[in-house]
Amino acid sequence: MRQILVTSALPYANGHIHIGHLVEYLQTDIWVRFQKLRGHRCIYICADDTHGTAISIRAHQEGRSEEEIIAEMQAAHIRDFSGFEIEFDHYGSTNSPENRDLCGEIWSALRKADMVVEKEIEQLFDVERGTFLADRFVRGTCPKCESGNQPGDNCGNCGATYSPVDLIDPVSSLSGSRPEKRKATHLFVQIEQLHDFLDEWTQSGALPTESSNYLKNFFLNEALRDWDISRPAPYFGFEIPDSPGNYWYVWFDAPIGYMGSTRKWCELNDENLDDWWRNPDTEVHHFIGKDIQYFHTLFWPAMLKTAGFSLPTKVHIHGFLQVDGEKMSKSRGTFIQASTYLKHLDPAALRYYYASKLSSKVNDLDLNLEEFATKVNSDLVGKVVNLASRTARFVKDVGLSAEYPDDGGLFEAGAAQGEKIAEAYEAGDFNKAMRLIMELADKANPYVEANAPWELRKDPEKADKLQAVCTVALNLFRQLAVYLAPVLPRLAEQAGALLKAPILSWDDAANPLLGSELSKFEHMMQRIDPKKINAMIEESREDQEQEQDQQTTGHSYQDDDAALKAEPIIEEITIDDFAKVDFRVARIVEAKEVPEARKLVQLTLSLGGEETRNVFAGIKSAYDLDELQGRLVVMVANLAARKMKFGISEGMVIASGPGGEDIFLLSPDDGAVPGQRVH
RNA sequence: GGCAGGGUAGCUCAGUGGUAGAGCAGGAGAAUCAUAAUCUCUUGGUCGGGGGUUCGAAUCCCUCCCCUGCUACCA
């Protein structure tokens, strides 16, 4: 029997669980349930990741304490997880005394190994808020190309990378005020001291090859930079004992949370932490997304090594979730919260769908909603559940045969696949496991078809044969339920209830159930109605609109890339090309209706003095004539005149937007006057 | 730009040197036990392009194109 400790990455306490997160928790839960079913000693440990700036900002916005928010969010996380039948042995919090102690323990080890150094850092400080600003909370003008409103670390216009302190006219997106430069002492861990160890460990087979190649080529090919591990007050986290006023950076205490949460579990279950974290016979498996690889594969093993804890046996790394081939999108309604999903659909469906897509490779996973429905309906309802549904009631009164009938070797063949399926589960190739299981299901239904129990029941003399055929079908069903049990725990329970024999072990798939009575058959799984998927999408869309309103008041920019994708940037031009277009500020002195035109309005634009232009603009659907009258716009003044059905158009008014009601005229800021050229 | 992964049937993907596969979707038929579930047959592919190695290449090598992701002191 193996002893296995399994973790998923700790979800951040600043947001709700969504279907992207669930890839990881479902993957882990399936793997853990598989190990338990195989008879191994396995615990699944997780916790909320609670520290850092984002929580503080939220607390400030909502006028509540950080503790209040993280408590509420933890309750919500636990509710969502249990809704998806994700079963932790312990779900803790990084904001716990156990975690603080362990952070201290690892910190002393790093100090003792002489790996900690102090450096002075210059950062932007938001005076109004009284806090240092991380890069992403600053915007300003790029020091290189001077384009405005750029992020704190790199320029979206020219691609330059820089430090926020180099920005021209920086603005804090927390308060909107202008931050000042301040110096502060930070503590750094010299991870380079463990370079040789990491070279070796990252190639030792604990990581997927994609990942070890990535680390080798991108990080370990040069000296590892010192890791900035402290943040000056105010910071929501643990204060560093030997460095008052400084706090451990959230990424220091987050992975230690795996151990902190284990320690809590140990206290509750009379276990010893060292038996799990310092025992060479205990396997430690982390499941994470590819975005947080370097924390788990460089810093984390370095910390463990230094403090004398077990190194991860394996780090299982998955890719990102896409929905219908695109990133989850708020505007498309594919940014689906776990709780929203649960309002409309069965968690078993998503469990199965993800399982059928997951492999041991670091691949992104596409949730194709149409495929999702057909796959669940045809595999689970049509093939698996249907086996029981079409035979159970024929033998409800007599139960299963006392001896296993001749089934042409079907059950044996299914049992023989057991190890192959187990290997696929073990390796994380759930898609392969599901394929192998469905192959078995594909053989079971033709058996029923060929033996036509519905014919046998018409002849009382064939009662034995009828019982035999149903015994086979129900045993094949049960075999499938055992193999699917890690993915579909509820189905396994229902199968156990139907056959009055609970499924407890993987070996149940190898031994037919005989002479057993049957309960009344009850539906085990509903087909997915596409209408419910649509309803879920609709609801997700609304949710996000509300959330975005909140976020804009908080000065954080949440623009998505839909517009840019819909209309990509066209080929490059020279400055000379640009200079050929003469943009001018103009005033709409008259706006008239064009009676027979569907889209057009007729505008008289003044460029100052006597100079006016007659322009037909396709903005009727978006603007009333009254609101156009008198306003300033930007026009192309040297565009060749064009004869249109209703007259001659002598220029063009510029606007953005896809059309219809969404047309947005550009207007100059106050002070501009008609006739000015736009450069 | 660099790096990684990928490109096989309409869709999702198996297949790593020996006759191109599965599920779903499409077409035809059967059955009526079952949640309109099931069964049988069937249409469909210059395996991203080009070049090379080989008796033989989806598979190995070179090259080009396309897609996705990552690009640490951001959580």
Image (cartoon, coloured by chain):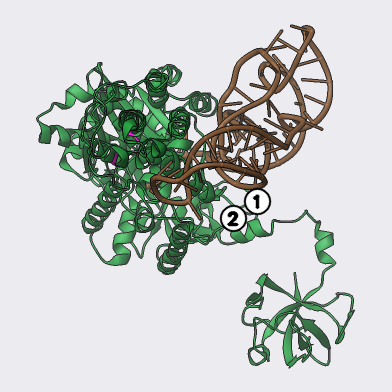
Residue A587 or A239: which is nearer the viewer? A587
Chain seen in brown: B
**Considering the numbered disc 2 on the image, is that residue within a helix, a strand or a loop?**
loop
Q: Outermost residue, left direction?
A: A270
According to the image, label 2 marks what residue? A142
- Tell whether label 2 touches label 1 (CB within 8 Å): yes
| Span shown in magenta | A485-491
- At horizontal 48% and vertical 42% (from top left) the residue drawn is A320
Give x and y (percent) for residue A47: 26, 42
Question: Which numbered dot is residue A132?
Answer: none
Give the answer, above or below, for where A76 lies relative to B37: below
Q: Is residue A268 left or right of residue A643?
A: left
- At horizontal 26% and vertical 30% (from top left) the residue drawn is A400
According to the image, label 1 marks what residue? A158
Which of the image's four quarters has the N terminus of chain A? top left
Amino acid type for the residue under numbered disc 1: Cys
Which colour is chain A painted? green
Give the answer, above or below, for where A394 lies relative to A83: above
Residue A389 lies in quadrant: top left
Question: Mark 2 or mark 1, which is nearer the start of the sequence?
Answer: 2
